[in-house]
Image: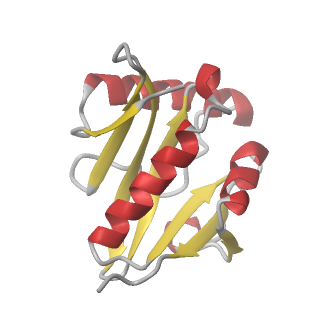
Amino acid sequence: MIWTIEQRPWDDPAGAALRSAQRAELDARYGTDDHEPGTPPSAADIDLFLVAVDPTGHPVGCGALRRLDVRSAEIKRMYVAPANRGSGVSTALLRALESAASDRGWTSIRLETGPAQPEAMRFYEREGYTEIPLFGQYIGSDLSVCYERFLPEVG
């Protein structure tokens, strides 16, 4: 499958629809709508939001970066529509996020997923992310599993 990855504003309708689908899937997996520790991402704190679209312009996935500090960022709202999983779009989105982080001088990317998302855990481990202790707002959460990957420094 061929797709294009585009930078879009956080409030982009296609991105909002993807995030809504992700939320519904996670609500079903966790059996509650109270499964996100910490502050949900917003237009005020997201540095980059990407949407993957197929050749017809239909959105198939998304992902965002939220700056944590001068050297690190967190991946937020990484999601691929079920019909497009296994196509490589998730890896392409992840690499685009990593490239954008590297371009900004960030050398560490962290993320939080959860125990009801074993596919996500396997994906990140396969892509070079290492499980780390819970960080920041996730400390003490039974619903969180955290990962990190260090990126090569640019320049």
Give the x, y percent position of residue 48.
Answer: 28, 52
Residue at 35% over, 28% down? 16
Place residue 9 in its image quadrant: top left
Place residue 57 in its image quadrant: top left
Is 47 located above or below residue 93 in the figure? below
Place residue 15 in its image quadrant: top left
Give the x, y percent position of residue 11.
Answer: 24, 33
Q: How many marks?
A: 0
Quadrant for the C terminus in the image? bottom left
Is 99 located above or below residue 52 in the figure? below
Residue at 38% over, 62% down? 99
Say if residue 116 shows up in the picture: no
Give the x, y percent position of residue 72.
Answer: 40, 76
Residue at 24% over, 38% down? 8
Q: How is the image coloured?
A: secondary structure
Residue most extreme to the top: 56
Quadrant for the N terminus in the image? top right
Residue at 58% over, 72% down? 148
Give the x, y percent position of residue 35.
Answer: 61, 44
The residue lying toward the viewer, choosing from 118 and 54, is 54
Left or right of 59 on screen, residue 94: right
Say if residue 47 shows up in the picture: yes
Is 87 located above or below residue 50 in the figure? above
Is 128 located above or below residue 51 in the figure? below
The residue lying toward the viewer, choosing from 152 and 30, is 152
Left or right of 143 on screen, residue 69: left
